[in-house]
Amino acid sequence: MNERITEEEVRLIDAEGEQLGVVPTTEALERAEAAGLDLVQISNADPIVCKIMDYGKFVFETKKQKAAQKKKQKQIQVKEVKFRPGTDEGDYQVKLKNLTRFLEGGDKGKVTLRFRGREMAHQDIGRKLMERIAADLEEIGAVEQARKIKKKKKR
């Protein structure tokens, strides 16, 4: 900005956005002072590109744009729905509806299938349940991570 620019020649853009070509830095500074504005380095090309503008207003506008972009962003959360191998049809439909709502809201869904005791011997029922869930939610979302089997440690 202004005297901090050490190059001998700069490509100058005036306050209206018109290119004035390659000019000596001293002349560019004089034009900026005559306009009552600052000479701001925009790019490190060869020669460097400078623009005549109000630097304070420029900083304010960029902060305002960043704040607006940050406001528009949405944090994606992972919502978990837990099933059991013996989940009845009514409960299944309610949990599926919740998963659908989460996915349509822009969040990710995590399906956990819990086995207790002798249910561990019937993992094929759980596998079929997971495949049914994936098939029912196929048009809304895709499976990001295949099923993993976590075993509890015995105490």
Image: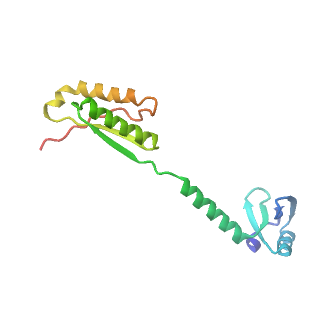
How many numbered callouts?
A: 0
**From the viewer's perspective, is residue 80 above or below residue 125?**
below
Question: Would residue 141 appear left or right of 8 to someone viewing this image?
Answer: left
Q: Nearer the viewer, residue 37 or 108?
A: 108
Residue 10, given in percent of the width and then of the height, sits at 82, 63
Q: Is residue 6 visible?
A: no
Q: Quadrant of the N terminus?
A: bottom right
Residue 12, given in percent of the width and then of the height, sits at 83, 62
Q: Nearer the viewer, residue 113 or 26?
A: 113
Q: Residue at x 29, y 33 (%)?
A: 92
Q: Nearer the viewer, residue 115 or 99?
A: 99
**From the viewer's perspective, is residue 57 above or below residue 94?**
below
Q: Nearer the viewer, residue 117 or 51?
A: 117
Q: Residue at x 13, y 34 (%)?
A: 117
Q: Residue at x 49, y 51 (%)?
A: 74
Q: Residue furthest left?
A: 155
Residue 63, given in percent of the width and then of the height, sits at 62, 64
Question: Would residue 18 appear left or right of 108 to someone viewing this image?
Answer: right
Q: Quadrant of the C terminus?
A: top left
Q: Residue at x 83, y 75 (%)?
A: 33
Question: Would residue 16 appear left or right of 60 to someone viewing this image?
Answer: right
Q: Quadrant location of residue 129?
A: top left
Display coloring: rainbow
Q: Is residue 96 visible?
A: yes
Q: Quadrant location of residue 8?
A: bottom right
Question: Would residue 102 appear left or right of 69 to someone viewing this image?
Answer: left
Q: Quadrant location of residue 99?
A: top left
